[in-house]
Image (cartoon, rainbow, N blue to C red):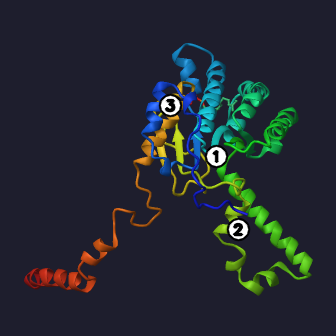
């Protein structure tokens, strides 16, 4: 069942003493009633960070893994329920040199092994989204171990998107919906066509069915998407889920991103007016009452146009 988007009771930060003076100053400016429930981050710029220092790309990734831990711990301190990090895309897997892919897999394993204790200290639960079954088996084993070792935690859920692509996620969801329908038709001893005719296809396949079949069915959609390194792209990340997310782009390269920058992104998010396709809070019923009826406005336009049109004939 898809996670409810209604706001859970707000839990204020009880770990303010763990923030630096600078971080606490930004945190105090945040509106506790407008905290996001889910922040998703496209971590970009590891290679450029290394290149600027004449270092190998690998060292940029290594430094990027440090940033992951800083940011996750900040998320946990401020009671952010969900943080999702784009750590390795399907395209990275297919298009990067084998040596870089192998290094990223090793880095992931050593990150998990080295940080599970800190995850537990911070009450963080580890999850993953993506075509995980295509990753090397020893990597999958370490991932499962980390999930199990943190499963009892009740604070922030850290989801790593690994071998992830949003289009393939939607394809997987469509296949799952179809497989369920075929299984039901078999159970009932009828054809798929007959099954769809009973209730109508609209009742069998709508946005909720797709959303419930996505890897993210158990989480609310991201309120905020952050992309580092200044690129203005979404890069096949959570395309369905970010339909109404606010987007924050920073030029900062991921290895330089810290907890305070997460707080600053949330501060920017809180200044946005989210309208979800509606009119937003700044448009009130009084504004509506004050509007002239559409028929009056139309009549006024026609009256203004008519003499000009007559003259041009
Ligand atoms: C983009 O930088 C980043 C990645 C492809 C991988 C993200 C990986 C990490 C942050 C480190 C490992 C993560 C975990 C969870 C251990 P890029 O290489 O595309 O940078 P560039 O665009 O500057 O070349």
The residue mark sitting in front, 2 or 1, is 1
Residue picked out by circle 3: 260
Image-quadrant location for residue 94? top right
For residue 72, side relative to residue 266 (left or right) = right
> Where 37 sits versus 259, above or below?
below
Q: Quadrant of ligand 1?
A: top right
Mark nearer the N terminus (2 vs 3): 2
Q: Which mark is residue 145?
A: none
**Quadrant where the N terminus is found in the figure:** bottom right
- Secondary structure beneath label 2: helix
Give me the C-alpha separation between circle 3 and circle 1: 17 Å
Contact between marks 3 and 1 (CB within 8 A): the answer is no
Residue displayed at 47% across by 62% down: 276
Query: Which of the two residues, 200 or 273, is positioned nearer the viewer here?
Result: 273
Residue labelled 2 has its Cβ within 8 Å of some atom of ligand 1: no
Residue picked out by circle 2: 209
Label 1 CA crowd tier, 10 Å (few <14, some 14–19, many 20+): many
**Quadrant where the C terminus is found in the figure:** bottom left
Residue 109: % across, % down? 79, 28
Image-quadrant location for residue 180? bottom right
Query: Which of the two residues, 135 or 272, is positioned nearer the viewer here?
Result: 272
For residue 114, side relative to residue 282 (left or right) = right
Residue displayed at 60% across by 42% down: 79
Residue picked out by circle 1: 82
Query: Which of the two residues, 12 or 245, is positioned nearer the viewer here?
Result: 12
Residue 283: % across, % down? 34, 66
Instruction: Say whether residue 264 is visible.
Output: no
Label 2 CA crowd tier, 10 Å (few <14, some 14–19, many 20+): some
Give me the C-alpha separation between circle 2 and circle 3: 38 Å
For residue 144, side relative to residue 170 (left or right) = right
């Amino acid at each position: 069942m898809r996670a409810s988007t209604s706001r859970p009771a707000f839990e204020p930060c009880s770990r303010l003493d763990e923030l630096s003076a600078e971080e606490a100053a930004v945190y105090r400016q945040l509106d506790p009633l407008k905290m996001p429930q889910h922040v998703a981050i496209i971590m970009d710029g590891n290679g450029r960070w290394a290149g600027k220092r004449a270092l190998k790309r690998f060292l940029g990734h290594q430094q990027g893994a440090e940033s992951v831990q800083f940011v996750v711990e900040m998320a946990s301190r401020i009671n952010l329920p969900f943080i999702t990090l784009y750590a390795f895309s399907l395209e990275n897997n297919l298009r990067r040199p084998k040596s870089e892919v192998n290094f990223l897999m090793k880095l992931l394993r050593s990150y998990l092994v080295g940080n599970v204790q800190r995850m537990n200290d911070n009450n963080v639960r580890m999850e993953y989204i993506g075509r995980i079954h295509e990753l090397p088996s020893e990597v999958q084993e370490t991932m499962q171990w980390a999930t199990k070792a943190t499963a009892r935690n009740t604070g922030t859920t850290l989801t790593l998107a690994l071998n992830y692509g949003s289009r393939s996620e939607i394809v997987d969801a469509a296949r799952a919906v179809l497989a369920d329908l075929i299984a039901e038709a078999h159970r009932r001893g009828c054809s798929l066509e007959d099954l769809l005719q009973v209730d109508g296809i609209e009742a069998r396949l709508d946005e909720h069915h797709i959303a419930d079949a996505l890897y993210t069915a158990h989480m609310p959609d991201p309120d905020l998407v952050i992309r580092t390194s200044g690129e203005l792209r979404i890069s096949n990340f959570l395309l369905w889920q970010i339909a109404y997310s606010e987007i924050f782009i920073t030029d900062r390269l991921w290895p330089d991103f810290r907890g305070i920058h997460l707080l600053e992104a949330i501060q920017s998010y809180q200044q946005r007016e989210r309208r979800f396709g509606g009119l937003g809070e700044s448009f009130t019923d009084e504004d509506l009452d004050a509007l002239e009826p559409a028929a009056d406005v139309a009549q006024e336009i026609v009256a203004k146009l008519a003499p000009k049109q007559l003259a041009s004939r």
